[in-house]
Amino acid sequence: MELLNPLIEYDKQLLLYLHSKGSLTWDAFWIFITNPLHWIWLFFVIYFLGYKIFGFKKTTVISIFIAVSGIVSLWLVNWIKNGVQRLRPINDTSINESLRVLIEQKDFSFVSGHATVSFTIAFLSFWILKKHYKHAYILFLFPILFAYSRIYLAVHYPIDIIVGMVLGFLIALLFYKLTYFFVLKD
């Protein structure tokens, strides 16, 4: 564990630096961005884009794969969080005196569920749609904003976000292969 101490300390310092860039002007924006309910419209957009390509039946099956990938991501995140039990920055007494507390959260920090689930959905949707929409990469704006909001609000460390992104990529890759095999290959 001592090998990880320099990384953990750097992670804390990076969080303090990034969090210090916040201001009252931006607080309401990032609190709005971090709420998953404010992103529901995006799922309708993704469904609509898929519907234009694949039709109702195939898009509905693809949507089920995407939903299951999100559920698996969330389950895996909770399993990791309960195993690692890293305190959130706002609950970590070694640094929380230097943080502005904008939202309260009591569960654990590592790994970010917001980052993992949103990147899972973004990667999976991107891979499905990229052949048909040259600007499908715009889908990544959602998880980037979503994940950064967690650092801005000091409820996650940068490493929580980075590992969440990688985990989301890996889960999306698995579900893309499943979706391709069962739905997309023709």
Image (cartoon, grey):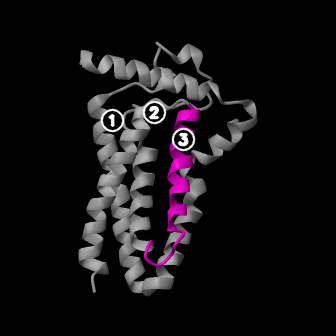
Q: Reading the chain from its start, which is encountered first: label 2 or label 3?
A: 3
Q: Amino acid at mark 1?
A: Lys
Q: Which mark is residue 70?
A: none
Q: Secondary structure at mark 1?
A: helix
Q: Residue furthest right?
A: 25
Q: Earlier in the sequence, mark 3 or mark 1?
A: 1
* Numbered disc 3: secondary structure: helix
Give the dominant element type of the magenta stretch: helix, strand or loop.
helix
Name which residue type carries label 2.
Answer: Pro
Which residue is located at x 29 percent, y 21 percent? Answer: 4
* Residue highlighted by disc 1: 81
Please give the label number shown on residue 158: 2
Q: What range of the chain is rendered magenta? A: 130-153
**In magenta segment, residue 137:** yes
Q: Earlier in the sequence, mark 1 or mark 2?
A: 1
Query: What is the quadrant of residue 20 in the picture?
Result: top right
Q: Position of residue 149 (x, y in %)?
A: 57, 40
Q: Residue at x 49, y 20 (%)?
A: 13
Q: Give percent across and percent down for residue 5.
A: 32, 17
Which amino acid type is marked by label 3?
Tyr
Residue in the picture at 52% in, 77% down: 49
Where is residue 2 drawn, in percent x and y? Answer: 25, 15
Q: Which mark is residue 148?
A: 3
In the depicted structure, whether residue 125 falls above or below residue 84: below
Observer-nearest of 22 and 27: 22
Q: CA distance from mark 3 to mark 1?
A: 19 Å
